[in-house]
Image (cartoon, rainbow, N blue to C red):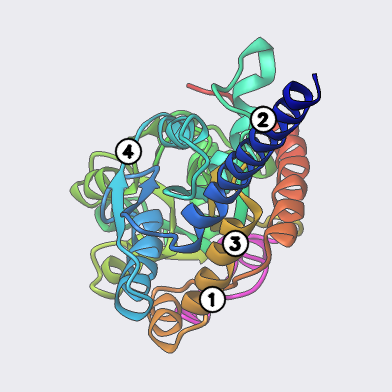
């Protein structure tokens, strides 16, 4: 009996040690897996086509990460539905740090109130389904016209446009990069505050809209400054004003819409930031944030952003989370007051 009891005790002790070692190994796996992160390419999903402002903001960041910290970041443009297609892809991705979204004021500010009014819904929750990592940059939109349209109708100022639109309701076509984008909402807010009616024509991104604008197929657009600035400087687009509260350093002679048309309170700025799926590991979020902030503040990226009229930012995940919540609150009021809807 004594021998059997002793044997059983030794057996139980051995089993306990084996189980304990196994538990240690399992608990160590995530830490070991994350210690060499990233060890494969990071998919950087962009909600709009190549050549648009969102893409233009992403590319210098991608290059800096690849050249400086040797992270393999692969840009993947997934345009459509005002950015909702790309956002849904990232919302449903594994939260392992290998899928990022270049979020925008559209995907994480405007689309929730715009698409849900009247009983609609988004295929994702901009707060619950994502992990904020860092705000990247902010920039103004710019009111641009087809030069021939402007010349034909003697439109040289914002007030000229307002007078023409009031005299010709429904005859001015207003292009945008898609429903819910800042380009769309800048126009809707303008229509609401000036009591004008212009026909909204949503495109799948800014580049095709700008091409049609220069071709004369549409009349005006409140485009993001980076995707129009080269065409403005070349004389292929006529710029009347920027939508920000202050003038842009990239085009200092251009007035704001508010000052040009005496519209106090008119202000629309676009922003872009990196988010991942919800429930990303804290150590990966911290590492991503630190690397992104360093890249955003690098001389190379700063120079490129400022040249295109964008202001580099870079902030903590907590700060970016608060920023997104405030943007949703802000745009919920704007959408309601303007009466904007998905066409």
Q: Position of residue 170 (x, y in %)?
A: 45, 28
Q: Alpha carbon of mark 4 to alpha carbon of mark 2: how far? A: 59 Å
Q: Pick whichever of labels 1 and 2 is earlier in the sequence.
A: 2
Q: Position of residue 3 (x, y in %)?
A: 74, 26
Q: Quadrant of the N terminus?
A: top right
Camera-side mark, 4 or 1:
4
Figure disc tally: 4
Q: Label 2 belongs to which residue?
A: 11
Task: Find numbered disc 4 in the image and state the secondary structure of the residue it sits on.
Answer: loop
Residue 277 placement: quadrant: top right
Please name whichever residue, 302 or 181, is drawn nearer the observer in this view of the structure.
Answer: 302
Q: Residue at x 50, y 30 (%)?
A: 169
Q: Alpha carbon of mark 4 to alpha carbon of mark 3: how far? A: 21 Å
* Residue 72 painted magenta: no
Camera-side mark, 4 or 3:
3
Q: Is residue 158 above or below residue 206?
A: below
Q: Residues within 10 Å of mark 2 (few under 14, many from 20)?
A: few
Q: Is residue 106 above or below residue 297?
A: above
Q: Is residue 256 above or below residue 281?
A: below
Q: Label 3 belongs to which residue?
A: 134
Give the magenta part as a residue range.
Answer: 242-262
Q: Label 4 belongs to which residue?
A: 78
Q: Position of residue 200 (x, y in %)?
A: 44, 32
Q: Pick whichever of labels 4 and 2 is earlier in the sequence.
A: 2
Q: Pick whichever of labels 4 and 1 is earlier in the sequence.
A: 4
């Amino acid at each position: 009996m004594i021998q059997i009891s002793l044997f059983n005790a030794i057996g139980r002790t051995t089993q306990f040690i084996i189980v304990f070692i196994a538990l240690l190994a399992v608990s160590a796996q995530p830490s070991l897996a994350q210690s060499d992160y990233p060890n494969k390419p990071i998919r950087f999903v962009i909600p709009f086509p190549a050549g648009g402002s969102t893409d233009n903001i992403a590319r210098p960041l991608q290059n800096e990460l690849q050249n400086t910290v040797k992270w393999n970041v692969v840009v993947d443009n997934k345009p459509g539905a005002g950015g909702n297609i790309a956002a849904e892809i990232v919302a449903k991705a594994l939260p392992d740090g290998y899928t990022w979204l270049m979020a925008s004021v559209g995907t994480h500010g405007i689309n929730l109130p715009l698409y849900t009014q009247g009983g609609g819904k988004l295929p994702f929750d901009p707060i619950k389904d994502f992990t904020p990592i860092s705000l990247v940059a902010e920039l103004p939109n710019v009111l641009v016209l087809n030069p021939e349209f402007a010349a034909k109708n003697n439109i040289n100022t914002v007030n000229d446009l307002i007078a023409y639109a009031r005299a010709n309701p429904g005859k001015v076509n207003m292009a945008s990069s898609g429903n819910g984008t800042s380009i769309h909402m800048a126009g809707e807010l303008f229509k609401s505050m000036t009591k004008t009616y212009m026909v909204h024509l949503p495109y799948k991104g800014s580049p095709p809209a700008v091409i049609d604008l220069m071709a004369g197929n549409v009349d005006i657009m409140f485009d993001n400054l980076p995707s129009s600035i080269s065409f403005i400087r070349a004389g292929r687009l006529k710029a009347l004003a920027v939508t920000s509260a202050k003038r842009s350093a990239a085009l200092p002679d251009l007035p704001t819409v508010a000052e040009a048309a005496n519209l106090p309170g008119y202000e629309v700025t676009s922003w872009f930031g990196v988010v991942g799926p919800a429930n990303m590991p804290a150590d990966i979020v911290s590492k991503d944030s630190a690397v992104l902030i360093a890249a955003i503040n690098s001389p190379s990226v700063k120079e490129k952003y400022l040249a295109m009229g964008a202001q580099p930012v870079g902030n903590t995940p907590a700060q970016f989370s608060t920023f997104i919540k405030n943007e949703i609150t802000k745009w919920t009021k704007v959408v309601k007051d303007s009466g904007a809807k998905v066409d």
